[in-house]
Amino acid sequence: MKEANQGFGTIAIHAGNAKDKSYGALTAPICQSSTFVFDDCAQGGRRFAGAEGGFIYTRLGNPTTAMLETKLAALEGAEAAAVTSSGMGAISAVFWTVCRAGVHVIADSTLYGCTYALLSHGLTRFGVEVSFVDTADIAQVKAALRDNTVAIYLETPANPTLKITDIRQVCDVAHNFNKNIRVICDNTFATPYLQTPLALGCDIVVHSATKYINGHGDVVAGAALGANDFISELKLFGIKDMTGSVISPHDAYLVLRGLKTLEIRMDRHCANAKIIARYLSENPKVTKVYFPGLETHPGHAIAQRQMKDFGGMISFEVKGGKEAGINLLDNLDLCTLAVSLGDAETLIEHPASMTHSTYTAAELKKAGVPEGLVRISVGLENPQDIIADLERGFSRI
Ligand SMILES: *Cc1c(COP(=O)(O)O)cnc(C)c1O
């Protein structure tokens, strides 16, 4: 169990582990059961009424999933966590819980493509107004606040431009205006190892656990974290009734397995990304590198302050624009052409036609995403091999 002052790696390995009562198994047992047996009707009634703990039905909770929730809450410094079947499951459950017709949401204009679609085309169908601003420019946040604003949503570093928003500044402005506004941060790119938004004033953190948290490219999963009362409401309404976004116990087990190595994986991702970013910034065929670890990045100082390290994601533009960028992607071998990120394998993609194809050309422009932008999720391979592959790719275009 978690003890005071333990390190991140220790917490990731030990928090929430309960001794297996059946056989004393070391690793988390996979409780692959849809439903749980009651002793008698009275007990079933008490569990449904919330008067007695214990499991009922896996959409309402499961022992393997609960273990993952305890671990993630310990890592993010949250009172509670809810794990879902995807990152979009977590994000949509949060919005179903926070919003109703007539409210207003402020969101950063640079977001993961499906989150942007949820906010711009989805919620607006149900009478929610959404204003897209650049949250890195605090004047834009201030100007967008209204009496019916219930939430501010942002990613930092943002997908795919690695834009950095000063989390504490946005939280201060929002909460001074109205303490009930929920500031929601998608912490997928940073992970709780590099950044803990709740400690900087955020109310809710969401994750695509598909990415670094699991880290092995074999699960789609998500999480939302925050205060006990919010997470209870999220579970009993946003997940149970509205989205039904329930992770399978087997997938929860795989994420628990992945989490054991999160710290050492992130250290390697960060170290590799610094080497690759330096290589790209010195490459004459690259016109611009987007990486918060570079001193030239506009968010470098803020990232240094609010993150432990700069992460494993880089974007860049190739001389010759979109055509040259696409040409590079089609000429790589080790760097694998695929969306998703945070895996052991280096993955490379073209946001405008893939992860961010939900944006129109005008919306991409507003979000600061050039049409030719290339996004690379630097993997855990030896960095000289990633560079050799990029070098070969550049020489072919
Ligand atoms: C992938 C991603 C999501 C969506 O998560 P899924 O697990 O694919 O549903 C949300 N936010 C960010 C920043 C992502 O990269």
Image: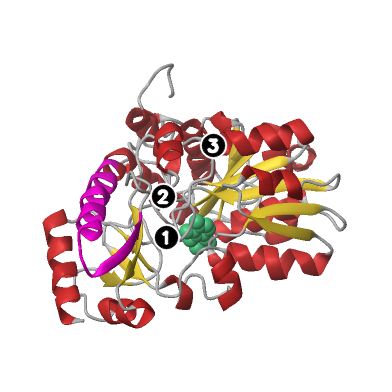
Foreground residue among 385 and 48: 385
Q: Earlier in the sequence, mark 3 or mark 2?
A: 3
For the residues bearing labels 1 and 2, Cβ distance under 8 angstroms: yes
Disc 3 is placed on an element classified as helix
Mark number displayed over residue 255: 2
The residues colored magenta run 267-290
Local crowd at mark 1 within 10 Å, few (<14), some, or many (≥20)? Answer: some
Q: Callout 3 environment at 10 Å: few (<14), some (14 to 19), or many (20+)? A: many
Q: Is residue 342 above or below residue 69?
A: below
State how far apart marks 3 and 2 are (Cα). Answer: 21 Å
The yes-or-no answer for disc 1 within 8 Å of ligand 1 is no
Quarter of the N terminus within the rendering: top left
Q: Is residue 79 visible?
A: yes
Residue at which label 1 appears: 219
Q: Quick one: SS at disc 1?
A: loop
In this view, the residue in front, 134 or 59, is 134
What's the amino acid at mark 1? Val
- 62 relative position to 307: left or right: right
At numbered mark 2, what does the secondary structure look like: helix, strand or loop?
helix
Q: Earlier in the sequence, mark 1 or mark 2?
A: 1
Q: Which quadrant of the view contains residue 310?
A: top left
Judge whether residue 288 is colored magenta: yes
Q: How many marks?
A: 3
Inspect the image, locate mark 3, and give the three-letter code of the amino acid beneath it: Pro
Asked whether, in this view, residue 350 is left or right of residue 53, the answer is left
In the rendered structure, are the residues bearing label 3 and label 2 in contact, judged by CB atoms less than 8 Å apart? no
Would you name the residue on which mark 3 appears? 197
- Residue 9: where, in percent of width, then height? 33, 32
**Tag 2: residue type?**
Val
Assign the magenta stretch its main secondary structure.
helix
